[in-house]
Image (cartoon, coloured by chain):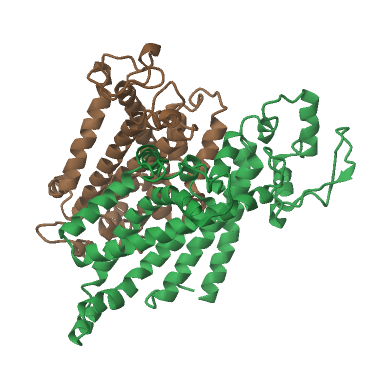
C-alpha cells in the first residue's frame, strides 16, 4: 500500500506539472496576452504597456516566463525602469513557493484574496454536503429494501428530476417562493432572505445566519441528494442478496439489524469514495449557487475574476482546484482499499 | 468469443456480439420495454419539433415593442413578454434551437476527439497508451465548469471567423474539448477487450491493415457504450451551456438561448416570475428526457458488462 501511495504521489506531481503547462499556455497564448486585462477600463499608454511588459517579464520567451512563474525570478535580475538594462533582483517567488502573484482586480496578493473567501465556501459547502448525505442515505436504503414499491418509484422519479433541474434555475424558483410569495406571518416581511451570508446591519445572530443558509444549501443539496440516493440504492441492491446477510438472518438477526448494520456498512464503502471525489467542491465552491445568492465565497470570487479576466487569480484557483481533485482521487482509492479488504492495488 | 457470449447469452437477451445482423433490432426491442425511455424519446422529439418549427410563431424573436413590456401570460402571449416586449414563447423556441444545437455539436466534438484517442490507446497499448491516458487524466483533473468559464471569458474577446464573440460554435467547442475524456476511456476499455478476440486475429491473419481492423472490425462492436455515453453527455452539454450563458459567458444576446433567457430574467424575475419559470422548464424537460433515453439505452445495450471485464467500470 505504501508503495502504491508513493507511486501515485509521484504521478500526482507529474500530472500537476502537465496541468500547469496547459493552464499557463492557455492564458499566455490568449489573444492580447495576460496584460490585455490589466488596464481594467482605463487604457494603458503604449509606453506604459511596454514598461509593464518588462516589469512582468512578458518580453522574455514563453518557456522562461513559465520557469519564472513556477519557481520565481529572485535568482535573476530584471529590468524595472524599462531601459533594457536588468537593474534589480526579481521579486517573485513562484507558485511552488506559494507566490501566486497579485490580483489585477484588487492589487492584493492572490493567496490573501483566496484566504478571505475560502472559509465562507467551506462553511456553505460542508453543510450542503452533510445535509445531502443525511437525506440521501435513508432514501437510498428504503428504496433498495422496498425495490419497486411506490416509495421506490417516487424516489427514483425524484432522483431523475433532481439531476435534471439546473441548480441556478432551482435557486431562482426558491427565491420566488420563499422571498416573493411567502411572508413571515408575524412581521409581514419576506420569509427568507434572497442572498448574502448575514444581514448587513446588526451583530452576529444564529437565527439570522441560518435563515441566510437555507436557500443556498437547499439549492446546492438537491443535485447531490438525487445523485447519492440513486447510488446508495444500487449499492444496497448489490449487497442485499449476498450470502452473508442470509447467514445473519439465519442466526436470528432482525431485519432492521441486517439492513442497517450488516448491509449498510458495506453499501457505504462506495459512497465514501464518491464523497471523497466530491470534496474538491468544498474548495472551489459552486459558482452558480454562490453567484445567485451573492455568497462571498470562492465560486463567486472566481466568477468576478473571470468577468474582469483577473488571470493570476483564475490560475491560482484552477491550479489549487486541480491539486484538490487529484488528491481527492488518491484519497478515494486509498479509502476504498482500506475499507474493502477485497481490493488490492498492484504494487 | 465464448467468454463474451457467456456474459449475456440467454435467448431473451442475446449478447450483441452473438448476432451482429440484428444488433439494433435487439437493442430497439429492449429499448421499447423501458417506459421512461419511450416517454423521454417522445418529449425530446416534441422539443426538437417545436424548435424546428419555431417560425410558425406569429412573433419575431428579436423585435421589441416597448408598449408590451412585461405582459403576463395571456391568450396572445402564452408565456408573456420580456423586458423588451418580445413574445417569450417565441424567444424560448428560437433559444431552444441554439441550446440544443450547442448540445449536439459539443457532443460531436467530444466524440471526434475522444473516440480516436481511446481507439489508438486501446489498440496499440504500450507507451502510446500511457501517454494518451496521462493526457486524459490531466483533463479529468481540471475543475470542468471553472475551466469552461475561463475559456469562454478568453474567447469572448476574440474575433476569429468561427469563434466570433462566443458564437454557437465557440461554446460548443469549449464544452466539447472538456468532455471527450469519458469517450476516450470507454473506447479504450472496449478496444482492450475486443482486440484480443479471435475474429480480430482472423482479420489480421487475412492481411487487414490496422486502420481497417480499427474502423471496420472493432469500432462497430464498441458502438453501444459510445451511444449511451453520448446521450448522457448531451444532457450534460445542454446544462453546461445554460449555466455558462446564465453567467454571461455563453451565447450573447440578442441571440436567445435558454441559459441567457434565464440570465436576462435575473434582473426582473422578482416582479415578473414567468420570465424565470418558462426557460427553466424547457431546460429541465430536455435534460430529464435525454437522461431517461440514456437510461433506456444503457439497459438495452448493457455495455458496462464489457467494461467490468477490464476493470474500467465498477
The answer to whether A184 is drawn above or below residue B241 in the figure is below
Above or below, comparing residue B308 to residue A298 in the picture: below
The residue sitting at the front extreme is: A186
Chain A tint in image? green
Using the image, determine if residue A253 lies above or below residue B134.
below
Whether residue B119 appears in this view of the structure is no
| Residue A25 in view of the camera | yes
* Residue drawn at x 28%, y 52% as measured from the top left: A159
Colour assignment, chain B: brown
> Where's residue A156, x and y in %?
24, 54
Along the line of sight, the residue nearer the viewer: B82 or A308: B82
Does residue B158 appear to the left or right of A149 in the view shown?
A: right
Residue B139 x %, y %: 50, 49
Residue nearer the viewer, A321 or B279 = B279
Q: Residue furthest left?
A: B11
Image coordinates of residue A16 in percent, x first then y, are 59, 55
Q: Specify the quadrant of the image occupied by residue A42.
A: top right
Q: Is residue A297 left or right of residue A156?
A: right
Quadrant location of the N terminus of chain B in the rendered image? bottom left
User: Quadrant location of the C terminus of chain B?
Assistant: bottom left
Total marks drawn?
Answer: 0
Q: Position of residue A279 (x, y in %)?
A: 48, 59
Amino acid at each position: 500500500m505504501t508503495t502504491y501511495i508513493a507511486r501515485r504521489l509521484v504521478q500526482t506531481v507529474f500530472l500537476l506539472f502537465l496541468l500547469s503547462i496547459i493552464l499557463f499556455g492557455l492564458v499566455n497564448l490568449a489573444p492580447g496576452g495576460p496584460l490585455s486585462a490589466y488596464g481594467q477600463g482605463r487604457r494603458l499608454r503604449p509606453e506604459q504597456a511596454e514598461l509593464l511588459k518588462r516589469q512582468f517579464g512578458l518580453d522574455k520567451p514563453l518557456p522562461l516566463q513559465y520557469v519564472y512563474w513556477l519557481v520565481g525570478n529572485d535568482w535573476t535580475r530584471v529590468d524595472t525602469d524599462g531601459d533594457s538594462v536588468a537593474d534589480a533582483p526579481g521579486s517573485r517567488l513562484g507558485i511552488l513557493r506559494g507566490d501566486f502573484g497579485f490580483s489585477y482586480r484588487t492589487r492584493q496578493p492572490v493567496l490573501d484574496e483566496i484566504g478571505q473567501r475560502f472559509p465562507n465556501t467551506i462553511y456553505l459547502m460542508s453543510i450542503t454536503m452533510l445535509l445531502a448525505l443525511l437525506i440521501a442515505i435513508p432514501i437510498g436504503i428504503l428504496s433498495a429494501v422496498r425495490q419497486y414499491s411506490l416509495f421506490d418509484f417516487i424516489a427514483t422519479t425524484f432522483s431523475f428530476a433532481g439531476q435534471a433541474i439546473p441548480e441556478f434555475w432551482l435557486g431562482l424558483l426558491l427565491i420566488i417562493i420563499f422571498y416573493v410569495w411567502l411572508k413571515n406571518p408575524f412581521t409581514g416581511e419576506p420569509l427568507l432572505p434572497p442572498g448574502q451570508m448575514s444581514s448587513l446591519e446588526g451583530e452576529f445572530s444564529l437565527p439570522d445566519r441560518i435563515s441566510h443558509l437555507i436557500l443556498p444549501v437547499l439549492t446546492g443539496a438537491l443535485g447531490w441528494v438525487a445523485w447519492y440516493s440513486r447510488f446508495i440504492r444500487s449499492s444496497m441492491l448489490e449487497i442485499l442478496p449476498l450470502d452473508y446477510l442470509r447467514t445473519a438472518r439465519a442466526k436470528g438477526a432482525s431485519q432492521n439489524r441486517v439492513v442497517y448494520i450488516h448491509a449498510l456498512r458495506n453499501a457505504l464503502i462506495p459512497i465514501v469514495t464518491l464523497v471523497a471525489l466530491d470534496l474538491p467542491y468544498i474548495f472551489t465552491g459552486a459558482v452558480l449557487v454562490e453567484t445567485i445568492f451573492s455568497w462571498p465565497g470562492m465560486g463567486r470570487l472566481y466568477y468576478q475574476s473571470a468577468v474582469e479576466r483577473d488571470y493570476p487569480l483564475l490560475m491560482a484557483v484552477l491550479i489549487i482546484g486541480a491539486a484538490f481533485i487529484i488528491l481527492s482521487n488518491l484519497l478515494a482509492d486509498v479509502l476504498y482499499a482500506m475499507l474493502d479488504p477485497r481490493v488490492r492495488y498492484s504494487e | 468469443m465464448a467468454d463474451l457470449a457467456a456474459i449475456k447469452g440467454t435467448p431473451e437477451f442475446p449478447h450483441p456480439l452473438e448476432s451482429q445482423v440484428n444488433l439494433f433490432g435487439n437493442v430497439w426491442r429492449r429499448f421499447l420495454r423501458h417506459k421512461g425511455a419511450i416517454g423521454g424519446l417522445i418529449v425530446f422529439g416534441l422539443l426538437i419539433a417545436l424548435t424546428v418549427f419555431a417560425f410558425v410563431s406569429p412573433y419575431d424573436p428579436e423585435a421589441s415593442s416597448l408598449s408590451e413590456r412585461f405582459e403576463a401570460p395571456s391568450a396572445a402571449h402564452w408565456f408573456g413578454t420580456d423586458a423588451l416586449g418580445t413574445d417569450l414563447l417565441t424567444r424560448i423556441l428560437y433559444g431552444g434551437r441554439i441550446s440544443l444545437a450547442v448540445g449536439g455539436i459539443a457532443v460531436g466534438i467530444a466524440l471526434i476527439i475522444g473516440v480516436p484517442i481511446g481507439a489508438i490507446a486501446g489498440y496499440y497499448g504500450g507507451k502510446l497508451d500511457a501517454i494518451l491516458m496521462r493526457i486524459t487524466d490531466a483533463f479529468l483533473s481540471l475543475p470542468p465548469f471553472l475551466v469552461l468559464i475561463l475559456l469562454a471569458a478568453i474567447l469572448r474577446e476574440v474575433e476569429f471567423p468561427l469563434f466570433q464573440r462566443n458564437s454557437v460554435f465557440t461554446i460548443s467547442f469549449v464544452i466539447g474539448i472538456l468532455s471527450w475524456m469519458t469517450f476516450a476511456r470507454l473506447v479504450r476499455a472496449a478496444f482492450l477487450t475486443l482486440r484480443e478476440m479471435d475474429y480480430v486475429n482472423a482479420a489480421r491473419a487475412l492481411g487487414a491493415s490496422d486502420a481497417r481492423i480499427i474502423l471496420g472490425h472493432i469500432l462497430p462492436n464498441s458502438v453501444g457504450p459510445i451511444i449511451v455515453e453520448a446521450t448522457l453527455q448531451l444532457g450534460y452539454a445542454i446544462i453546461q451551456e445554460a449555466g455558462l450563458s446564465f453567467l454571461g459567458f455563453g451565447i450573447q444576446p440578442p441571440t436567445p438561448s435558454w441559459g441567457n433567457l434565464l440570465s436576462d430574467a435575473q434582473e426582473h424575475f422578482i416582479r415578473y416570475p414567468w420570465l424565470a419559470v418558462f426557460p427553466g422548464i424547457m431546460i429541465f424537460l430536455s435534460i430529464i428526457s435525454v437522461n431517461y433515453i440514456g437510461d433506456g439505452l444503457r439497459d438495452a445495450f448493457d455495455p458496462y458488462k464489457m467494461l467490468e471485464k477490464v476493470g474500467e467500470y465498477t
